[in-house]
């Protein structure tokens, strides 16, 4: 799923570059990089909401906004890059951004899958008859072993989710450092001309 998202994002950027590439002045690409970076920074509102503003709207709304702004900001930054990999720092920054986007797509899938699974298990538990386990098994219902297997899958899923989050946060931290270095180097080598 992440590969498909990444493929279509790159296809969209390539199509944009092919159609509008010569029509836009160079400065437009610089402004797209600035706008994309600002939009990606706005996407971090999700983290602020999660940690500090717990009563401000629903988490799902903030997560959807995080995904939308992260995707759109990344699109603008892809266009900003113009598919050039001439310098090391901008190339590393773009690769780090792609890794953050891919890990974000994977995380969104994991969150969705885990949420559905937990909802299904809660619904099954609420409907479960209050009979003896042997009576339940005789009636063709799921056995205790099946329930235990499902519980193990959910425990594993939660563990995977924790590891994914650690990877996503570390990649985001690396991306932040690379963006700052990229901006500083561009300002240094190009001057403050925009």
Image (tube, helix red, strand yellow):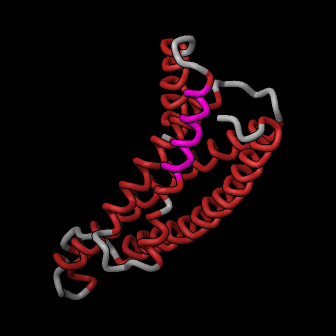
Tell me where residue 136 sits by quadrant: bottom left
User: 10 and 18: which one is in front?
Assistant: 18
| Rendered location of residue 122, percent (x, y) | 27, 75
Bounds of the magenta segment: 27-40
Q: Residue at x 22, y 74 (%)?
A: 138
| Rendered location of residue 25, percent (x, y) | 57, 19
Q: Is residue 116 visible?
A: no
Tell me where residue 185 sits by quadrant: top right
| Rendered location of residue 47, percent (x, y) | 49, 68
Q: Residue at x 82, y 38 (%)?
A: 189
User: 57 and 148: which one is in front?
Assistant: 57
In the displayed structure image, the side of residue 97 where residue 127 appears, left or right? left
Magenta region, main secondary structure: helix
Residue 61 included in the magenta stretch of the image: no
Q: Residue at x 41, y 69 (%)?
A: 150
Q: Which quadrant is the C terminus positioned in? A: top right
User: 34 and 59: which one is in front?
Assistant: 34
Q: Residue at x 52, y 50 (%)?
A: 38
């Amino acid at each position: 799923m992440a590969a498909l998202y990444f493929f279509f994002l790159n296809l969209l950027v390539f199509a944009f570059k092919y159609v509008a590439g010569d029509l836009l002045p160079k400065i437009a690409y610089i402004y797209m990089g600035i706008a994309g970076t600002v939009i990606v920074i706005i996407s971090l509102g999700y983290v602020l909401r999660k940690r500090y503003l717990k009563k401000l709207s629903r988490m799902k709304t903030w997560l959807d906004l995080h995904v939308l702004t992260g995707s759109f900001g990344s699109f603008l930054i892809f266009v900003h890059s113009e598919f050039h990999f001439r310098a090391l720092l901008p190339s590393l920054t773009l690769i780090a951004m792609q890794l953050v986007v891919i890990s974000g797509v994977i995380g969104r899938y994991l969150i969705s899958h885990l949420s559905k699974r937990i909802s299904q298990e809660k619904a099954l538990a609420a409907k479960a008859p209050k009979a003896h386990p042997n009576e339940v098994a005789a009636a063709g219902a799921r056995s205790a072993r099946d329930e235990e297997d499902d519980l193990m899958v959910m425990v594993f899923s939660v563990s995977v989710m924790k590891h994914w989050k650690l990877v996503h946060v570390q990649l985001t931290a690396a991306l932040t450092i690379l963006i700052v270095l990229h901006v500083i180097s561009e300002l240094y080598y190009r001057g403050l001309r925009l």
